[in-house]
């Protein structure tokens, strides 16, 4: 049993290399083992490219070993034609006799049928190992598949006395962020931005900070930018409206500007909770995770409608004495660490 855990853990480790690359596909990892040695490994390619199992099989140099090898894979192999042919066909054709699967794929086009196909071809399939860790690893994909909405991460930085910024009236006239967390934390945030498909801020944050919401301090892709601007009062010259990256503005106006080049306008239904409307729009676009970066009113909208999965909260060393109060949130503390002078806590909503 322990040996299966060891290699499945390795699947999760290499599957993580596909974070921010494979989405909305799951970041699957696959490992091929023969006579106690790893002879092949692979992870999901950028969206549209080969899946982990195919990359792992292709990486084996002595294909003759496959007939007595075991394939470990963090998610049930697909059995449907998507952007690539079914992995089950490739696995069956490889002659490998045994497959150890982390968790089943809830996608209705797979949902146990991948495993059945392998078994019907005479392959031994072992399941039920490391379920919790596999579910945690695939949480973005599973949330989108099982709950029909993106995985939602709330993130903010608060002062030691619990404020996220001075009062709006006390801010500089030229819009720029008021930094509470230090440079290392901010760099980590840029890494996080490469890991999620979309990033959201509220109107007053766009007005006060003129943020770019890019991942310029890290290598990787920029997320799709989402802005709540019910009254379309964010200035046209703002970085968020500069057409540099796909951006959607959620509004409640009768005559929004025309969509053009990376900038679209999405009408909100004023009677319905905004977080739910944004989540369902994002799901339809295939955006399976959103990092919500503030401000307080926007974060509180997600907290009060209980539409969040994870919260990442920096606490900087400064004391502001007054200002915009940080959101109050209840969740299970799953990690705590320090970066320079900042404390970082990660909460889970469960
Ligand atoms: N330290 C940190 O991590 C962060 C700090 N900040 C700071 O926070 C401040 C902004 O925070 P905050 O004022 O809370 O701003 P938000 O960015 O959350 O935007 C607030 C605006 O949203 C609109 N709004 C209010 N209620 C609702 C509702 N129910 N549904 C939808 N929209 C609503 C209102 O604009 P309208 O009436 O036009 O609809 C309101 O002015 C800035 O100073 C910024 O620098 C921001 C992000 C992170
Ligand atoms: N003030 C503050 C944050 N503010 C967030 O970062 C945004 C600025 O992004 P950018 O323009 O891309 O650098 C800003 O609008 C707000 O959402 N974040 C933090 O990690 N720590 C901080 O102290
Ligand atoms: Zn596949």
Image: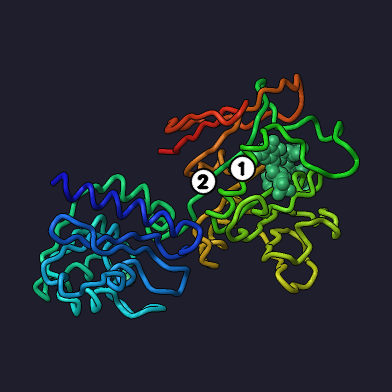
Asked whether mark 2 and ligand 1 are closer than 8 Å, the reply comes as no
* Residue 308 point in image, percent of width and height: 51, 44
Tell me which residue sits at (49%, 35%) in the image. Answer: 346
Asked whether mark 1 and ligand 1 are closer than 8 Å, the reply comes as yes
Q: Quadrant of ligand 1?
A: top right
Tell me which residue sits at (45%, 74%) in the image. Answer: 48
The 10 Å Cα crowd at callout 1, few under 14, some 14 to 19, many 20 or more, is some
Position of 4 with respect to 243 (left or right) is left
Residue 144 figure quarter:
bottom left
Gap in Å between the C-alphas at discs 2 and 1? Answer: 9 Å
Label 1 SS? helix
Looking at the image, which is closer to me, 237 or 182? 182
Question: Tag count in the figure?
Answer: 2
Q: Is residue 200 visible?
A: yes
* Residue 130 point in image, percent of width and height: 24, 47
Residue 92 figure quarter:
bottom left
Circle 2 sits on which residue? 307
Circle 1 sits on which residue? 301
Indicate the quadrant containing the C terminus: top left, top right, bottom left or bottom right: top left
């Amino acid at each position: 049993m322990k040996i299966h855990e060891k290699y499945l853990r390795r699947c999760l480790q290499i599957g993580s290399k596909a974070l921010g690359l494979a989405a909305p596909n799951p970041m699957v990892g696959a490992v091929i083992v023969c006579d106690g040695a790893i002879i092949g490994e692979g992870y999901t390619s950028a969206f549209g490219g080969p899946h982990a199992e195919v990359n792992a099989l292709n990486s084996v140099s002595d294909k003759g070993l496959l007939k007595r090898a075991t394939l470990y894979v963090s998610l049930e192999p697909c059995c449907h034609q998507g952007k690539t042919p079914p992995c089950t066909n490739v696995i069956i054709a490889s002659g490998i006799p045994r497959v150890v699967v982390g968790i089943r794929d809830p996608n209705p086009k797979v949902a146990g049928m991948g495993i059945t196909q392998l078994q019907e071809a005479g392959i031994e399939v072992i399941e039920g190992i490391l379920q919790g860790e596999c579910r945690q690893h695939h949480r973005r994909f599973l949330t989108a598949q099982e709950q029909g909405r993106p995985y939602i991460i709330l993130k903010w930085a608060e002062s030691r006395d619990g404020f996220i910024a001075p009062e709006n009236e006390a801010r500089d006239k030229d819009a720029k962020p008021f930094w509470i967390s230090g440079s290392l934390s901010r760099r980590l945030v840029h890494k996080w931005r490469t890991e999620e498909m979309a990033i959201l801020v509220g109107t007053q944050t766009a007005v006060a900070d003129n943020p770019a919401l890019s991942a310029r301090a890290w290598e990787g892709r920029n997320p799709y930018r989402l802005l709540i601007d019910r009254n379309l009062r964010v200035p046209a010259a703002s970085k968020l409206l500069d057409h540099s990256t796909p951006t959607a503005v959620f509004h409640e106006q009768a005559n929004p500007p025309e969509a053009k080049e990376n900038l679209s306008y999405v009408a909100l239904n004023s009677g319905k909770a905004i977080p739910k409307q944004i989540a369902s729009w994002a799901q339809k676009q295939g955006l399976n995770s959103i990092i919500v970066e503030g401000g307080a009113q926007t974060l509180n909208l997600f907290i009060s409608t209980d539409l969040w999965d994870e919260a990442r909260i920096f606490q900087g060393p400064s004391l502001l004495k007054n200002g915009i109060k940080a959101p109050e949130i209840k969740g299970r503390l799953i990690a705590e660490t320090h970066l320079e002078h900042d404390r970082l806590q990660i909460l889970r909503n469960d």
